Image (spheres, rainbow, N blue to C red):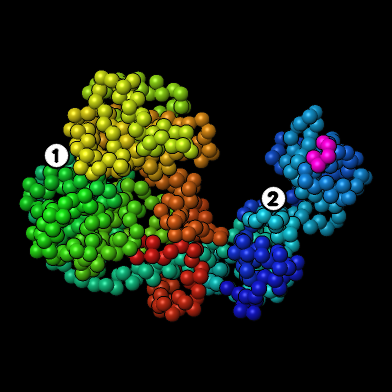
């Protein structure tokens, strides 16, 4: 990024001694380039001077004042300097907690610039949080747009601004350009050296934004180049599958009591085109809860089975795997498909029997959990892998299953729609199919918010649905009582609801500590209508399909993420019956908690919810890769830079088309692509 002679220790910068260097190290600032690439997190416009009379109307004000007098408040060690100031509009005071040394600076009759927030207390306008600078014609931290940097304890903004400025004095404008000149001209980007200076010392917000866009585009450009390399590597593997008559697929479609939606038909065509292409399929099928993804996966599997190959469908939980197996048995066994189930809770004898059937080809399609890629499991000819709720599996698990076959096709499914900006970047080496329309007869779930303490009204609404012959879920964040968290839990509430609230109905309890066989029995009772209320933790987030259930009650809803709330709400509304979701929230809501509940109240569109989830949680948590290290760009913002992402991807594709050699590992190393990609674990990207 910079010439090597400038990749030197940060202690070369004027004003940075051993102690400051140690503090900078806590911010991962070790070299001069590190310091220059430590970008501001915000900016404050101090070009306009405010008045004291306006200070209570604004969050922060920028004042030019005269010191009137000094005083003190408190006694002994708590004695604190208080300074009175004025301008033409009025008077105020500065309360200098921990800064009594300012008595030698804020001398009466002198002029100062003051930036801070003011409140009305004790009969006067006062501030305890402020910055000051003696008035001069050439201000260091006023009369301009001022950067606000991420800091650590022991550093302050004035010091950081000063040493960043000193770092630039070492560079002599000798900074390498990172993108081709014609792309810079195409988007009217400034030279890189100029953009970096503007980021730290902006003259106006317009030039700041165009500089930010250049640096964001660079990050996205190299990421897209990296992703296209992965995609090319995958596409280079070739194999051939014989054409089939689609006899099995057509037989299943004829048996369905409904017609496929237009989106299901379109997506099925996209998948089948891949299945009979000369390259292995690597496709993600995304769609909202209840849109019919599993049926599309079954139909796709039939074409592979008809060609003489096997299919494995992997689910993240035994509960979901059994649900898929039951649906597959109902739909596929009548047309002659031989099915198998392989989960961790099976007996050794059952595992050996299924394992032998897979090895000899007596099973056409096996459904299971991570047991599918155990070392002792062998397949005769594995042609297609379907992975449901793909974000719950690591890539190493996907690779382990893929190695059971010879370049099998891979279909990833997710009910958590991927925002467009993420699909263009972190899933750029995948082809993506989307189902947006819902099957006919489905009605949107009505969502109600209820504050803790108003549960009785919710219970009355649920009771009315039970009287109509319907069923309900009650979901809690904890299994049992916690000493550290004052939250309701599934076990205690199961007892309370059974004995006090719904005495006339049968309830059952499910959570992760219930043994698998018992959990299956209880779930079967609920599915078959033998009990009317299912009390659970978020273990029922996926894999539960009970059309007769019309009420979902989630207590302490603020404790759940948007994706989990949307998935849980998706357990109801799976028929033509009017369904309801009740979100009961606690008293101490955070700002993000309020935003999540508001989104859930305002929309049932999973794609819109995914976009909002990205804004609230950020890409690291949303993609489930936070544990591998923070997923962050220095400049680019996936929630607002979608246009830049699309431009970068298109430009990279055009460059690669003209010069495929840029995708070679050698050139990627020379161009320092891997250094330009944010610090996440590459192995966690879809595709491995």
Q: Is residue 520 depicted above or below 663 in this figure?
A: above
Q: Is residue 644 magenta?
A: no
Residue where numbered disc 2 is placed:
44
Q: Quarter-wise, where is residue 193 in the image?
A: bottom right
Which residue occupies 69% across, 40% down? 59
Residue at the right extreme of this rendering = 109
Residue toward you, 197 or 317: 317
Residue range corresponding to the magenta coloring: 74-78
Q: Which mark is residue 257?
A: 1
Residue toward you, 400 or 192: 400
Element type at marker 2?
A: strand
Question: Mark 1–mark 2 contact, CB under 8 Å?
Answer: no
Which residue occupies 62% across, 75% down? 7
Query: Marks 1 and 2, how far apart in space?
Result: 62 Å
- Residue density around tag 1, few if under 14, some if 14–19, many if 20 or more, within 10 Å: few
Location of the N terminus (image quadrant): bottom right
Element type at marker 1?
A: loop
């Amino acid at each position: 990024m910079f010439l090597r002679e400038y990749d030197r220790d940060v202690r070369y910068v004027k004003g940075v001694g051993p102690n400051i260097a140690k503090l900078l190290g806590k911010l991962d600032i070790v070299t001069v380039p590190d310091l220059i690439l430590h970008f501001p997190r915000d900016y404050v416009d101090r070009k306009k001077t405010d008045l004291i009379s306006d200070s209570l109307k604004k969050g922060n004000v920028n004042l030019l004042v005269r010191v009137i007098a000094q005083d003190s408040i408190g006694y002994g060690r708590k004695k604190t300097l208080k300074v009175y100031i004025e301008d033409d509009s009025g008077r105020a005071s500065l309360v200098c907690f921990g800064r009594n040394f300012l008595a030698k600076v804020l001398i009466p009759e002198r002029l100062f610039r003051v930036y801070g927030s003011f409140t009305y207390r004790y009969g006067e306008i006062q501030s305890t949080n402020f910055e000051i600078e003696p008035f001069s014609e050439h201000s260091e931290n006023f009369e301009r747009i001022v950067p606000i940097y991420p800091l650590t304890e022991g550093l302050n903004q004035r010091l950081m601004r000063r040493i960043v400025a000193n770092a630039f004095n070492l560079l002599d404008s000798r900074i390498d350009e990172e993108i081709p000149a014609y792309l810079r001209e195409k988007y009217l980007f400034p030279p890189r050296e100029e953009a970096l200076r503007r980021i730290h010392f902006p003259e106006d917000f317009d030039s700041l934004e165009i500089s930010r866009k250049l640096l964001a585009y660079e990050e996205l450009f190299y990421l897209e180049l990296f992703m296209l390399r992965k995609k090319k590597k995958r596409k280079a593997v070739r194999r051939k599958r014989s054409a089939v008559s689609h006899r099995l697929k057509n037989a299943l479609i004829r048996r369905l009591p409904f017609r496929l939606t237009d989106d299901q038909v379109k997506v099925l065509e996209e998948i089948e085109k891949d299945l009979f292409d000369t390259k292995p399929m690597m496709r993600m099928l995304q769609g909202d809860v209840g849109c019919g993804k599993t049926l599309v996966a079954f139909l796709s599997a039939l074409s592979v089975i008809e060609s003489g190959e096997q299919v494995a469908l992997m689910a993240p939980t035994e509960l979901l795997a059994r649900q898929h197996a039951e649906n597959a048995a109902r739909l596929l066994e009548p047309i002659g498909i031989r099915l198998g189930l392989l989960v961790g809770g099976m007996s050794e004898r059952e595992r050996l029997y299924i394992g032998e059937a897979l090895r000899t080809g007596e099973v056409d399609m096996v459904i299971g959990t991570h047991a599918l890629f155990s070392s002792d499991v062998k397949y005769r000819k594995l042609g297609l892998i379907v992975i449901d709720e793909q974000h719950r599996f690591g890539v190493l698990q996907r690779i382990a299953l893929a190695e059971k076959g010879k370049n099998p096709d891979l279909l990833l499914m997710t009910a958590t729609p991927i925002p467009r900006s993420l699909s263009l970047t972190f899933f750029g080496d995948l082809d993506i199919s989307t189902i947006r329309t819902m099957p006919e007869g489905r009605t949107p779930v009505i969502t109600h918010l209820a504050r803790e303490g108003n549960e009785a009204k919710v219970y009355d609404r649920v009771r009315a649905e039970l009287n109509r012959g319907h069923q309900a879920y009650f979901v809690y964040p904890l299994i049992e009582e916690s000493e550290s968290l004052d939250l309701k839990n599934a076990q205690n509430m199961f007892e309370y609801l059974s004995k006090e609230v719904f005495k006339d109905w049968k309830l059952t309890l499910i959570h992760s500590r219930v043994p698998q066989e018992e959990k299956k029995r209880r779930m079967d009772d609920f599915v078959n209508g033998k009990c009317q209320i299912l009390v659970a933790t978020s273990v029922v987030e996926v894999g539960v399909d009970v059309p007769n259930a019309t009420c979902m009650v989630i207590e302490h809803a603020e404790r759940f993420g948007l994706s989990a709330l949307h998935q849980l709400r998706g357990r109801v509304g799976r028929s033509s019956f009017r369904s309801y979701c009740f979100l009961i929230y606690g008293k101490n809501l955070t700002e993000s908690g309020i935003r999540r509940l508001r989104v859930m109240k305002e929309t049932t569109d999973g794609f819109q919810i995914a976009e909002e989830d990205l804004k609230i949680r950020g890409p690291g948590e949303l993609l489930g890769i936070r544990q591998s290290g923070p997923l962050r760009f220095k400049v680019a913002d996936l929630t607002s830079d979608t246009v830049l992402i699309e431009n970068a991807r298109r430009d990279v594709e055009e460059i690669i088309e003209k010069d495929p050699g840029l995708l070679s590992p050698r050139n990627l190393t020379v161009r320092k692509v891997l250094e330009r990609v944010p610090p996440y674990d590459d192995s966690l990207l879809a595709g491995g």
